[in-house]
Amino acid sequence: MAWAFDLDGVIWLGDQPIAGSVDAVNHLIGLGERIAFVTNNSFSRRSAIVEKLGRLGIDATDRVITSAMAAATLVSAGERALVCGGPGIIEQLELRGVEVINAGEEHAESAVVDVVVVGFHRTFDYRRMTIASGAVRSGARLLATNDDATYPTATGPIPGGGAILASIMTAAGVQPEIAGKPHEPIADLTRQLLGSTGTMVGDRPDTDGRFARTLGYRFGLVLSGVTSTADLPTEPPADLVAGDLAELVQQALSAKSPDR
């Protein structure tokens, strides 16, 4: 069986692992289940996410898929990209052979680019919004790694990449292409790694639940992130609901028929 896991709100909150999550993942690996970590985090480099999981005790080598990776598949080698985002986006675009201009650089205002790529970053400001929206109005495509309005942290939700994207698309007056969950570009990468059937586990019905439907997977909802019991039932409805990942995995394995 295949399992796709969100990270924030499922495996950890900020830098704090959620109790039982590491043991649950390693139990599945020990059973021979195929797993991947599918995240809309485009700020962090893929290698940094692998290393963070490794520090927690999970071998995530070749098991991490990010929205930055999905966005990079929509940009062709040789194109020029204005990046309004973090190092994870820059890394994936450069790996693809894309010429990258950081929106924070001094010469970015006068750059002629083919695409503007937007994702979460903590240095976003009015100048970057002006430069990015101006490039789009001049003819560049607007591509977003994701449109999550918030991200969960140990101290509560913070504005996400979708909040940054909203300002740029409003100023530019265009609708973006979106690469991350729940959209098809990241679903393609996930199916390539895990196959056509499995369970998507996340804490956001609007993102992870819809992504499960895009994949054709079951949706496992955990209440350790942004969704609480007060939000139930959700849309789309979850196939499995549990307080956290450890409980959900136990529930799913207990329900498996002997011949599966």
Image (spheres, rainbow, N blue to C red):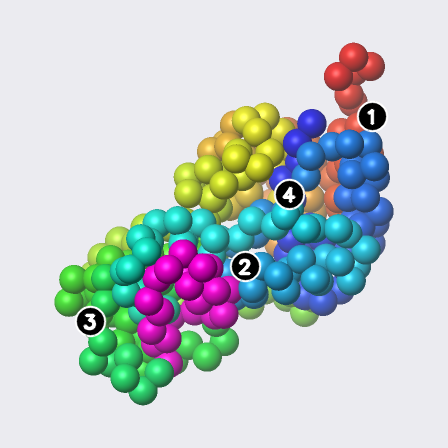
Question: Which comes sooner in the sequence, label 4 or label 1?
Answer: 4
- What's the mark number on residue 41? 2
Q: Secondary structure at mark 2?
A: loop
Magenta stretch containing residue 98, yes or no?
Answer: yes
**For residue 257, side relative to residue 203 (left or right):** right
- The percent coordinates of residue 69 (x first, y second) are 47, 53
Residue 167 can be seen in this image: no
The residue lying at 52 percent from left, 35 percent from top is 192
**For residue 6, side relative to residue 186 (left or right):** right
Nearer the observer: mark 3 or 1; the answer is 3
- CA neighbours of label 1 inside 10 A, class few (<14), some (14 to 19), many (20+): few
Q: Secondary structure at mark 3?
A: loop
The residue lying at 54 percent from left, 59 percent from top is 41
Residue 156 can be seen in this image: yes
Q: Which residue is mark 3?
A: 112
Q: Label 3 is placed on what type of residue?
A: Val
The residue lying at 49 percent from left, 70 percent from top is 87
- The percent coordinates of residue 152 (x first, y second) are 61, 61
Q: Label 2 is placed on what type of residue?
A: Asn
- What's the mark number on residue 36? 4
Q: What residue occupies the far top of the structure in this picture?
A: 259
Q: Label 1 is placed on what type of residue?
A: Ser
- The percent coordinates of residue 3 (x first, y second) are 66, 36
- Whether tag 2 and tag 3 are in contact, CB under 8 A, the answer is no
Distance between the alpha carbons at the discs numbered 4 and 2 = 14 Å
Q: Which residue is mark 1?
A: 254
Work out whether 135 lies above or below 176.
below
Distance between the alpha carbons at the discs numbered 3 and 1 = 57 Å
- The percent coordinates of residue 158 (x first, y second) are 55, 68
Distance between the alpha carbons at the discs numbered 4 and 3 = 37 Å
The range drawn in magenta is 84-104
- Whether tag 2 and tag 1 are in contact, CB under 8 A, the answer is no
